Image: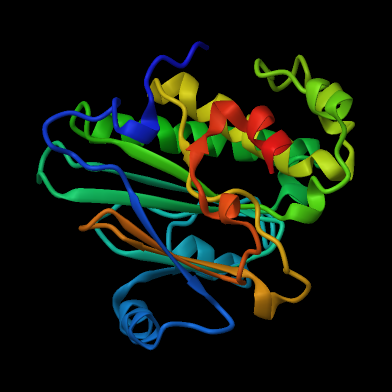
């Protein structure tokens, strides 16, 4: 699908609706004011915990295929956060509810080792992602929806080659292409994650999401993982992660440009 809307410039938005803005803080040397804000933020926000058991996820109306596979939050007005994104990616949806006129949001947290490499989990994830995207689109005013993607690990692409990138098509179709798509190399896991998310979301929503920040580095332990905190009302995401040694690691880009951006990084 051809992307004709520059989501970095908010061309997909109407009526004064704003793009999601990001704030990045060094997890190992946090700004005290930001840390205080996040500590208070978490008290009244919806938490997506990868360690939830089956009953907790069911009680909280979280879509999943089981522990450590993926989590898709309910769609509502609440603030949301999730932590310990290592190889994982996340999607943030925000839009203006047709009935209340207030911003509503959804947050995901998915493990590529599960949704890329296990065919059954992949099919379930895609189906739940499609349902969520369709529900979000139908619930929100036209021109009010913005979507960004976060997460990923630099180690997954540190050894990539041009040929490895070009082997993966934009028009991935589950079922028809599952066998080829699952035959992936570790260094292209991040690229495959973004391509799958972009394809499934953009064909429903009509635009390619923004990658808020490229894949991260220095993620040797959970203490160095990415934390994602989304303020629904103000359309603002706070990213807590290790310091990145290149400024380009903090620059957003459109998901459909993943191949050219990886070459730059």
* Image location of residue 199, percent across then percent down: 57, 25
* Image location of residue 156, percent across then percent down: 80, 49
Q: Quadrant of the C terminus?
A: top right
Taking depth in this image into account, of 204 and 241 the one nearest to the observer is: 241
Quadrant in which residue 165 is drawn: top right
* Image location of residue 163, percent across then percent down: 88, 24
Left or right for 21, reference 88: left
Q: Which residue is depicted at the point 73% across and 18% down? A: 169
Q: Which residue is depicted at the point 70% across and 22% down? A: 174
Image height of 151 relative to 47, above or below: above
Left or right for 238, reference 181: left
Quadrant in which residue 14 is drawn: top left
* Image location of residue 115, percent across then percent down: 71, 43
Going by the picture, which residue comes out furthest to the top?
2
Left or right for 79, reference 71: left
Image height of 211 relative to 164, above or below: below
Numbered-mark total:
0
Taking depth in this image into account, of 62 and 216 the one nearest to the observer is: 216
Left or right for 223, reference 32: right
Image height of 92 relative to 85, above or below: above
Q: Which residue is depicted at the point 27% across and 57% down? A: 232
Taking depth in this image into account, of 241 and 172 the one nearest to the observer is: 241
Residue 138 visible to the viewer: yes
Check the image and tell me how it is coloured.
rainbow
Q: Which residue is depicted at the point 40% across and 40% down? A: 147
Residue 75 visible to the viewer: no
């Amino acid at each position: 699908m051809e992307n004709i809307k520059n989501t970095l410039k908010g061309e997909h938005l109407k009526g004064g609706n704003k793009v999601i803005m990001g704030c990045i803080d060094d997890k190992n040397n946090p700004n005290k004011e930001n840390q205080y804000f996040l500590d208070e933020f978490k008290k009244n926000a919806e938490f997506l915990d990868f360690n939830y058991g089956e009953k907790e996820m069911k009680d909280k109306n979280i879509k999943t295929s089981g522990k450590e596979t993926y989590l898709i939050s309910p769609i509502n007005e609440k603030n949301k956060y999730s932590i310990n994104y290592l190889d994982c990616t996340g999607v943030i949806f925000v839009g203006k509810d047709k009935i209340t006129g207030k911003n509503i949001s959804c947050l995901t947290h998915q493990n590529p080792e599960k949704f890329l490499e296990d065919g059954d989990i992949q099919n379930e994830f895609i189906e739940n992602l499609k349902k969520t995207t369709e529900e979000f689109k139908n619930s929100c005013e036209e021109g009010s929806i913005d979507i960004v993607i976060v997460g990923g690990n630099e180690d997954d692409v540190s050894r990539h080659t041009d040929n490895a990138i070009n082997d993966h098509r934009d028009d991935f179709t589950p079922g028809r292409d599952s066998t080829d798509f699952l035959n992936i190399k570790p260094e292209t896991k991040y690229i495959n994650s973004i391509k799958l998310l972009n394809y499934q979301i953009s064909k429903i929503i009509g635009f390619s999401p923004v990658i808020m920040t490229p894949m991260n580095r220095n993620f040797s332990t959970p203490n160095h993982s990415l934390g994602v905190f989304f303020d629904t009302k103000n359309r603002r995401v706070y990213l807590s992660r290790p310091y990145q040694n290149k400024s380009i690691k903090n620059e957003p880009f459109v998901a459909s440009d993943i191949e050219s951006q990886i070459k730059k990084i």
